[in-house]
Amino acid sequence: MATKHKGRAIGIDLGTTYSCVAAWEEQNGRAEIIVNDQGNRTTPSFVAFTDQRLIGDAAKNQAASNPSNTIFDAKRLIGRKYKDPAIECDLKLWPFKVVSGADDKPMIKVNYKGKEKCLAAEEISSMILSKMKEIAEAYLDFSLKNAVITVPAYFNDSQRKATKDAGVIAGLNVMRIINEPTAAALAYGLQKRANCSEKRNVFIFDLGGGTFDVSLVTIEDGVFEVKATAGDTHLGGEDFDNRMVRHFVQEFKRKNRVDISGDPRALRRLRNGCEKAKRILSHANDTTIEIDALFQGIDFRFSITRARFEDLNRDLFEKCMEISQNCLDDAKMEKREVHDVVLVGGSSRIPKVQSLLEKFFQRYNLCKSINPDEAVAYGAAIQAAMLSESYSIVPNMVLVDVTPLSLGIATHGDLMGVVIPRNTAIPVKMDGVFQTIEDHQPTASFPVYEGERTKAGENNLLGLFHLSGLPRVPRGHPMNVIFELDYDGILKVCAVDETTGNKNGITITNEKGRLSSAEIKRMIEEAAFFKEEDKKFKKMVKAKNALDDYIYRMEKAMKGFDVSSKLSPSEKETIMSKFRKGKRMLESEEHNEAAVFENYLKRLQKMCQPIVINKVRDYSDEDTD
Amino acid sequence: MASLYEVLGISMGASCHEIKAAYRKLARTCHPDVVAMNQKESSANMFMKIHSAYSTLSDPDKRAKYDRETYGHMVMMRSSSNMAASASYQSFCQQGRKWETDQCW
C-alpha cells in the first residue's frame, strides 16, 4: 500500500443538532469517540455571536438569553435554496434571521460585536467542523488536516458539495464524504460482526436530530455492499420538538389567553423544555414541563403523556415506516431476509418508533447494541483510517456505496431520462442514447438532473451543456451520452456524436448556488479572522482575570497587615485609588483590548512591588495553603 | 475484450456462490479506496468492470441473456431454459435506452 492520504485522520459526524468526532486508535484496534472540552461525547451544532463567538455547548447554554444570534440547524439550510419548500416552515420557527442572498442562497444574519454580518450555512457548518477539529487536536495532541465527514444518505449533490466546502473553509482536507447509515454499518460490522464471515443483511434505521435515513447493507467477508438507501432529509427529532412546541403554544394560549409565538426567548426556553421532556418520555409514561415566568411573568406548567407525544407525531413516525418499505422494495428484499435491524440516531430511542419497527419487521430483537449517538462518527473514523496511509493496522474492509438519487437528462417534454438509476454502486460509468427531435437540428442541449420525479423540472438541476455542430440530418440523430460518477461522487457527463466524433461534456462542480472558489477563499479568510478574534477575546479574558486577581490579592494584603512602615497614608491612598480605577475598567465594556489590561497590571505591579514584595508573597503563600 | 467471466477470473460454469466470492475477493484488492493514490484512476476503471461483471452474472436472468448473446447456442445447453430462449430476440431489441433531447435553438 503506497501513498494514500498523508497524516492521521479523523471522522466527523456533522449532525443537525449534535456533532461527534472520532479517531482510529491503532494500538486498540478500534475507533475512539473524542470528548470535548466540557467532557461531553457529542457537541451541540450551535454557533452563537455576542461580543465573542461561541461554538458547541457554550453556544447552546446561552441560547435562551441570546436567541436571535444563536444559530442552529445550519444543516437544514446547507446546499438548499431560500425558496426550497422544505425550509419554508422552518423559516417561521427559527429565532434567527435568514434572508435570500445571491442566487437565492439563504444567508443568516447575525450581530457580531455590534455589527451585522451575513453568513452562509457553509460558514456556520465550517465553524462547527473547526470546533470538532480542535477537540480532536487537543485529544490527539497533533495538528490535523484529513477528515471524513458524514452526510445523510439522501443528501443531494449540492448538499454534499456544500458540506465539503464547509470542510475546506474549516481548514480540513475532506478525504471523503460518506453516508451516515453506511458509516453506522461500518461501525456495526466492526464492533459486532468482525468475526462473522457468513452473509448478513443489515438494515440500518437512522433517525437523527434533523434527518432520517435507511440503508440496506450486505456484509460478507469484509465487503460492505450497500444494496439500497432511502430517506428524508427533513425528518427527525427537531420536527418532533416542533410539534410539541406548537402544541404547548396553543395550550398556553388557551389557558392564559396570551400568545408567546412572537417571543423568541420564550420559544427557545419552551423548546429546550420540550427536548428534555421528549427524552424523558422515552423511559417514563408522563412528565411535566415547568418553566418559571415563561411569558409576562406567567409560569409555564404542563404535563404531557407518552401517548399524547406519540399522537402529535403519528404521521411522522408512519412516514418512517413507509420509507423503510421503499428501501426494501428497492433492494428487492423481503423483510424476513433481513438478519439485523440496527438502530442509529438519538430519535431511534423513541419507544413508539421501536414498536412500529418491530411490528414492521415482525420481530422483537432490534439491535440496540451500538451507541446510536456515536456509531456514525465511529464508522467515519474507520473509513478515515482506511483512506489514510498513517495507519498500518486497519480493518480489512471495503465499502461499496450507492448513489441515492437517479441521474439523468431532461428530454423532450421535460421528461427525466434516467441514465444512472438510484441505488447503483459507485464508481460507475453508464451511457444512454439520446436523439435529436427536429430535422437539421444544429445543437442539442443536455440539462443534467438528479432526482426521482418523472418531470425533470421538479428534480435538482446539476448543470447544462450543449453539443453543437451536428450534421444536417433528419430528426432522430443519435448521440451517446456517458455519465461517469467517481468514488468521490464527482459526476462527469459527456455527449458524443458518433458520426462526426464531436464531443462535449461537463464536470458537475460549480453549479449555481454553490460557493465559487473566490467565495471559499474569502470565507477561509473570514474564518481566520473569527479565529483571530476568538484568540484576542481569550487573551483579553486572561488579561482581565490576571488584573482582577492581582487587585484582589493586593487589596487583601494591604488590609491584612500593617503597611504603614513602608507606605505613607497618601501613598496608600494613591495605590488604593489605582485599584478602584482598575476595578472600574474591569467592569466597563469600554475596553476590549488585552493590552490595556496587561499594561495597567504592569503599572500596578511596578507601583506596589518595591514596597510590599516580600510581605505580599508571604501573605499570598499562606493564603493558598 | 475479456469476457465477464474472465474479468472475475472464474470459469463459465461457476456457481452463484463462486461468482460472489470472486467479486468480494477482487473488491477487496481493486476498490479505489484500498489502492495507492496514483492508481485510483485505473483502479476505479477496473472496479467498474468488476462490478458490472458481477451485477450481470449474479442475476440469473441477466447472466442467461449475456451467455446467449456472447456465446450463442453453445451455452444454451448449460442454461437450458425455454423462457430465456424465447426472450432472446426481444432482449436484443431492448438494448440501449433511447430518448429524444430537447432542442436548444
Image (cartoon, rainbow, N blue to C red):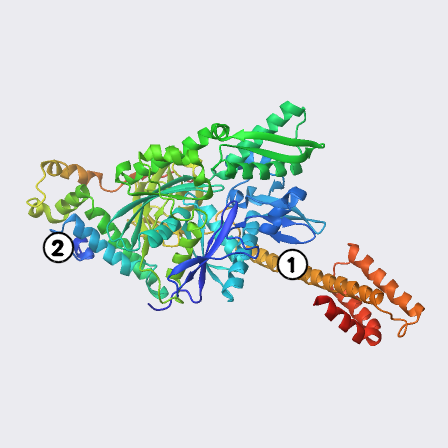
Say if residue A53 shows up in the picture.
yes
Q: In what element is the residue under mark 1?
A: helix
Mark 1 to mark 2 CA distance (whole Å) = 65 Å
Q: Chain of mark 2?
A: B
Q: Residue at x 33, y 40 (%)?
A: A365
Lateral position of residue A183 relative to residue A128, left or right: left
Q: Amino acid at mark 2?
A: Ser
Residue that label 2 marks:
B11
Q: Is residue A82 left or right of residue B93?
A: right
Q: Which residue is pictured at 67% across the width and 54% down the height?
A: A52
The type of residue carrying mark 1 is Asp
Q: Are marks 1 and 2 on the same chain?
A: no
Camera-near label (1 vs 2) is 1
Residue A233 at x, y percent in the picture: 46, 40
Q: Quadrant of residue A333?
A: top left
Classify the position of the N terminus of chain A by image quarter.
bottom left
Residue A111, position in %: x, y? 68, 47
Image spot of residue A155 (x, y percent): 44, 44
Residue A486 x/y as whole percent? 36, 54
Q: Secondary structure at mark 2?
A: loop
Task: Residue under label 1, please give it.
Answer: A534
